[in-house]
Amino acid sequence: MTCGTCVGRISEALEAQPWSRSVDISLLSNSAAITLSGREHVEDIVGTINSIGYEATVEKVEELKDSRKTSKKAASDVYQASYSISGMTCSTCIGTINNALRQHSWIKNVHINLISNSALIVYQGKDNQSQITDSIANVGYDAVINNVVELGSSQYQDQRRETLIRVSGMFCENCPRRVYDALSEFGQSVIIEEPLTLANPTLKVRYTPNAPEFTIRDILASISARCPSFELSIYHPPTLEERAQAIHIREQRRLLLRVALSVTIAIPSFIIAIALGSLTPSDSRVRQFFAQPIWSGQVTRADWALFIMATPVYFLAADIFHRRALKEIWAMWRRGSPTPLLQRFYRFGSMNTLMSLGTSIAYLSSIAQLVLAATNPSRSTSHAASSTYFDSVVFLTMFLLVGKLIESYSRSKTDDAVKMLGSLRPTEALLVVPHTNGGQLLQSGDYSRHTKRVNIDLLELGDITRIPHGGSPPWDGSVVEGDSEFDESSLTGESKLVPKKVGDKVFSGSINRGNPVSIQITGVAGDSMLDQIIRIVREGQARRAPVERLADTLTAYFVPSITLLAVSTWIIWLGLGLSDSLPQDYLDTPRGGWPLWSLQFAIAVFVIACPCGIALAAPTALFVGGGIAAQNGILVKGGGQAFQEASQLDCVVFDKTGTLTQGSEPVVTDYAALPRDDAALMSSMIRRLEETSSHPIAKAVVAYLKDEHLQDLQVKSIDDIPGKGMKGTFTSEGRDVDVIVGSEALMADYGVDLQNGICQNVYSWRTMGKSTATVASNTGSVWQFEMCFAISDPPRREARATVDALRRRNIDVWMLSGDNITTAAAVGDMVGIHKDNIIAEVLPGQKAEKIQHLQRTVLELKNQNISRKSRARSKQRATVAMVGDGINDSPALTVADVGIAIGSGSDIAISSADFILVSSQLDSILTLIDLSRTVMTRIKFNFGWALIYNLIALPIAAGVLYVVKSDGDHVRLDPVWASLAMALSSIIGIASQISVKLDTALAELAALQAYHVDNFFDDKLFDLKHLQRPVDSPRKLSPTTKTTYTSQPPTGLHLLGFFAPDSSPAREEASAQLYLLSNKANALNPY
């Protein structure tokens, strides 16, 4: 794939298949993500792509979980296939493959990524897999299947593990049998999934590890004991990024060879055609020598020399364009092509077609001039000056190839984020040897003395590894020995060290900055937090933004439009010339007359047109933006559409508990109860009831009652009342007791009479922002009040500053809470949310309805304060973001235009969210919004640049300025300079899109706007949150340094000032940090 036209062609081809459901193609990563119905259609994807002239391979296939109520059989019959597709050059390629696959009814979804040359295809029916490859092949692309995953089935049903073992050193047919004999001693514990052959020396085995007794190390040791001459290793199929890199390297190598050939020939071509033909005096002997006709007619030495040099360039260097163009034409016109006959005339070709047409017309017209000169019997030299375009063929090809080489190199640098994340994991680990020399198992405290270095592929769940200072865990695990501090900034963007003690989780990709610790592996390949982050980033980059559909539409008709314009240009100029409507001095070519003179304008139109800027405007910026977000602890699950929605936010809605409040460890601060003799029994029933709930308030009550001695009682039933509380029935001493614990609304439902004294306490607690949990019991027919708990869940430290910063961005802030209105209003007052923007006492199922209500009404409130003219141009519906912690928030996150989940630890796979804040810091929302706006602004700029370039360049190439004279010569754009302009436009477009990385300083500094004095300083503590970065040589400001502070909202790079006591160490450190950040931003700011 080379341009947006390729993307469009592949998308259309895949979307046309009946088994295709969705197609997302990335030009930058040369990959695609495709959802389809039926796993058997995976190969049809490759076939469809191949049929339209591109090559594809399957990278991975995963079965999607169906949220609808379908039968287990139907849910398990959906598969996701990953393909690698070669030959895609633009969005047209994507459209062609998309259309080919969409013709199959069993295709559910198609995501094609042009950047990584890959595709994710979801399909139904395992038997349809072969048809996918065939469908892609039928449209002219090569597709290779990489992986097939059955969707709907649990990925972790048990601890069974499948491993590929590469066996090197086999030399005869009996060697595989020797390996099988070594595995037979394990019986059914090791099952061979794929046999071993000499042609494919990779063995796939399935086993259930039980570290340290039975691991992959035992399997490899058994084979080595039987076959000591064999070399064994764990084989990993190439990842999507590795395949994309291989495609880029192969493409760059092909281009580099052709660039070397064209540049080598361009040097003598320049000397003969330009230096000797135009720059040297006319009486120069060398010039006269090359201007003399030889061999036949009026063909000069210069013509023959240029012909000889241009021919290998045309056939050996420009062949990369000719082959692709011919393949596209063949795929469209071949017998059985799915492209409708009429559509073949108005939707065809790609960037390769334009390049091939430009160079071909120049070469063939030069051949025609050569023939005309050779058939002219006159040997006079009066008209012997070279007028062929052979030199143009050489320079056209050279500039086009150089531009494509630079563009290919730039595109290959856009997926650095995933590569960087993958490089965080070490390749080796210190495995604690499970047994001592005496054969006894090691005990805690002995782990540091018995270790050996092994490859991380040899580790299993339950293994214990040693993490030294400066080391990184090979996989996720829990600390079993030692205390330390870990740097998790690579995963969360939070540079503050996280203390770890026995029982705490540590994650692969983090770094031990303290004492050595021992951990027990809890998650291996594919199951670690780092693997989940990489998977989410990769899938997010494959999802396209709605704005990319506009690019697909434009590029789909681009080549036919340029072809029509070029032909019309030639016909118009030719008609004007032959009808004597043009002055004779316009004809400045000695041979060929008006037909060949007019042809120069058509060639210039062909080569100057560039759809690459249009096609790459969105995917490059989105690809880079997703990587930047991941580096700042923000995972983009929603891809381009999420970025586009986040850049247009009108309203942000926060959940209260766990989002605006800390939520992690709320505590019971107050307690009131009626006196009773069996208080211990009631406490036991409450504890048993609340232990079954995962709500933070329930956990706080359980923690408060943990020291109570549990009475002997029988649990008959426990019911969860969504949004209100819990109800249970217990049996003690032969009598049944019903107990309810929950909100005041729950008490009202059961007619509980709350006493006045208790009510006063409850109201007092709520005005302090505390939540309450009320308890009532029933031993007969009347419910009686028993006790009430007040639970304190303080607001997050950065909550108020984040709310203020959102308002400065003209974004409304609301709160949704299931708590009572008094508590919600108190918390809202603490974080700066007006009581009119608080919706309390909302059940979980009602949150989605409230989000829909805000989508309809928020803009109505804003539009009341604007003019009628502005109101007419405003949006019809508000764009609303919902921020929640995933507890009872899934419906609201799904309904909201942008769902933002607050993640923590390994809780990052929240399916209903578009963005996941791994760092759990609310200020990351500001970075998210600013980054989204920067990305979308860059996309608009790139679209504008591409459109303006084509709108200006095409008329100039067509000759609108030819009537203007400069130094006695008519102003025209020679085809050679047209090709240079096209190459430069593509390079500038790519560079502009990748320059989003330079805007990260603005995204970092924007978060500083959110903080006030009380959020940073307590006279002894300064915390820059995730904005802190290690400094090689920390510097302090000199006493003469002048720093300007402002309390007004910052503009551009002006920073919000921080105020602390002059003698405070925090003030001095803050000034130094701000000075460094400001210098960084000013250095990167182009304005």
Image (cartoon, helix red, strand yellow):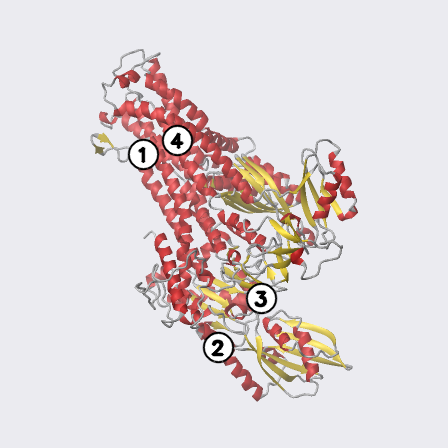
First along the sequence among labels 3 and 2: 2
Label 2 vs 4, first from the N-terminus: 4
Camera-near label (1 vs 3) is 3
Residue at the far left in the pictured view:
968
Q: Position of residue 536 (x, y in %)?
A: 55, 53
Looking at marks 1 and 4 on the same chain, the residue that comes earlier in the sequence is marked by 4
CA neighbours of label 2 inside 10 A, class few (<14), some (14 to 19), many (20+): some
Mark 2 or 1, nearer chain start = 2
- Indicate which label's residue lies in the foreground, 4 or 3: 4
Whether residue 17 appears in this view of the structure is no
Q: Is residue 954 left or right of residue 146?
A: left
Three-letter code, disc 4: Met
Say which element carries label 3.
Answer: loop
Q: What's the mark number on residue 887?
A: 3
Q: Secondary structure at mark 1?
A: helix
Q: Residues within 10 Å of mark 3 (few under 14, many from 20)?
A: some
For residue 163, say whether it is visible.
yes
| Residue located beneath label 2 in the image | 826
Q: Which residue is mark 4?
A: 398
Number of residues whose C-alpha sits closer than 10 Å to that of mark 4, classed few (under 14), some (14–19) or many (20 or more): many
Q: Is residue 254 above or below residue 1067?
A: above
Q: Amino acid at mark 2?
A: Ala
Q: Is residue 401 above or below residue 992?
A: above
Q: Secondary structure at mark 4?
A: helix
* Sequence-first disc among 4 and 3: 4
Q: Nearer the viewer, residue 1024 or 492?
A: 1024
How far apart marks 2 and 4 lie (CA) works out to: 70 Å
Please provide percent x and percent y for residue 538.
54, 49
At label 3, the amino acid type is Ile
Res. 502 image quadrant: bottom right
